[in-house]
Image: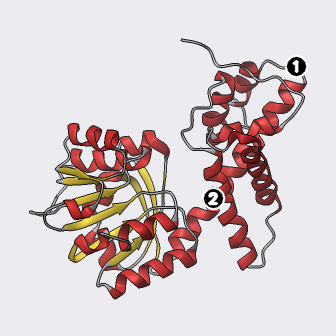
């Protein structure tokens, strides 16, 4: 990878995806700073080769050619970029910010307009692939924005992604593609949970059911990944139930704005809402299976 001389990047949000992206930038030879409220995450990234870490961009020296914002919500992205000590002020002229939260097209357009008023170019660039793909620098990026934004972010895009899709020039298109993707992801998890719950009710050992499905035509990536958590009785969150309450909420809002019916997504949304209401919001999203009564689920294996 050809990294321009003096090129610097900053990753905002060192969670499972953000940490992977930050480490991928370092491995690619890009001097990279990290911002996170967690002292432990900052220390982890610093030990792994960060140029510097901080809880706010105001603590850094100099400015950045590229910034990746990997937070959860549109409100968080707006706050870190434009709030007190806003990180957007630390982006060089000619640089760009890659906003990678899952948000509505309207929120993406509004943020881009406010950044443009400051002279900052934004790429509407949600990501997918999970923590493992992020750590390997193999995320999928579904991005929309100007050619200038893609060019300014080229080194970091090459570092963090194996697939970069240029959806088009219009901000909001990338956000919409991610929302549609999350429709599939959420429905797949809910359908997998329903199938495994039915197996439990029928007295089929869930490890056997899992093995059959993952070697047959009914399998999906989400089933294979998430229903393993059910088999193991381990609901430690990689992506929490409440994340899909948010994301499927965005899906239903998108359908409503387009006057387009989404019966499967609406059902899955109700299932995740019920799981959250039952107290499982902070658990792994596979805990949506706990909305089914009258079944016995595997307990977590000790050791």
Q: Is residue 119 left or right of residue 175?
A: left
Residue 125 makes an appearance in the image: no
The residue to which callout 2 is attached is 247
Location of the N terminus (image quadrant): bottom left
Mark 1 crowdedness (10 Å alpha carbons): few <14, some 14-19, many ≥20: few
In the drawing, what numbered circle is on residue 96? none
Q: Nearer the viewer, residue 1 or 74?
A: 74
Residue at the farthest bottom position: 117
Count of numbered badges drawn on the protein: 2
Q: Residue at x 27, y 52 (%)?
A: 34
Q: Residues within 10 Å of mark 2 (few under 14, many from 20)?
A: many
Residue drawn at x 78%, y 74% is 260
The residue lying at 79 percent from left, 31 percent from top is 196
Image coordinates of residue 148 in percent, x first then y, are 30, 79
Badge 1 element: loop
Q: Nearer the viewer, residue 290 or 282?
A: 282
Please tell me whether residue 15 is drawn above or below residue 125 in the rendered image.
Answer: above
Residue 282 at x, y = what percent? 61, 42
For the view shown, which residue lies furthest in the top direction? 303
Q: Which comes sooner in the sequence, label 1 or label 2?
A: 1
Disc 1 designates what residue? 203
Specify whether residue 223 is in view. yes
| Picture quadrant of residue 150 | bottom left
Relative to residue 138, is residue 263 depicted above or below? Answer: below
Q: Nearer the viewer, mark 1 or mark 2?
A: 2
In three-dimensional space, the C-alpha distance between marks 1 and 2, rounded to whole angstroms, equals 33 Å
User: Horizontally, is 202 left or right of 167 in the view?
Assistant: right
Residue farthest front in this picture? 84
């Amino acid at each position: 990878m050809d990294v321009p001389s003096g090129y610097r990047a900053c990753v905002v949000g060192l969670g499972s995806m953000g940490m992977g992206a930050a480490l991928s930038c370092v491995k690619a030879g890009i001097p990279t700073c990290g911002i996170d409220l967690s002292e432990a995450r900052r220390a982890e990234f610093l030990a792994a080769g960060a140029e510097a870490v901080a809880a706010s961009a105001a603590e850094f020296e100099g400015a950045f050619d590229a910034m990746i914002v990997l937070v959860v919500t549109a409100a968080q992205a707006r706050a870190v970029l434009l709030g007190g000590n806003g990180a957007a002020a630390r982006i060089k002229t000619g640089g760009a910010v890659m906003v990678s939260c899952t948000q509505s097209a309207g929120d993406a357009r509004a943020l881009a307009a406010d950044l443009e008023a400051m002279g900052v170019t934004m790429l509407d660039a949600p990501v997918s692939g999970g923590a493992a793909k992020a750590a390997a620098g193999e995320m999928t990026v579904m991005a929309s924005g100007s050619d200038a934004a893609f060019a300014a972010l080229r080194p970091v895009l090459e570092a963090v992604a194996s697939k970069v899709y240029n959806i088009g020039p219009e901000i909001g298109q990338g956000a919409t593609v991610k929302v549609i993707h999350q429709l599939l992801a959420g429905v797949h998890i809910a359908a997998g949970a329903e199938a495994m719950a039915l197996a439990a009710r029928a007295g089929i050992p869930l490890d056997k059911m899992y093995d059959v499905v993952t070697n047959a035509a009914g399998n999906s990536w989400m089933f294979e990944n998430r229903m393993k958590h059910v088999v193991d009785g381990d609901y430690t969150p990689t992506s929490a139930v409440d994340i899909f309450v948010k994301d499927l909420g965005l899906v239903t809002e998108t359908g409503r704005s387009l006057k387009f019916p989404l019966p499967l997504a609406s059902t899955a949304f109700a299932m995740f809402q019920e799981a959250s209401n039952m107290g499982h919001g902070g658990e792994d999203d596979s805990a949506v299976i706990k909305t089914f009564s009258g079944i016995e689920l595997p307990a977590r294996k000790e050791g």
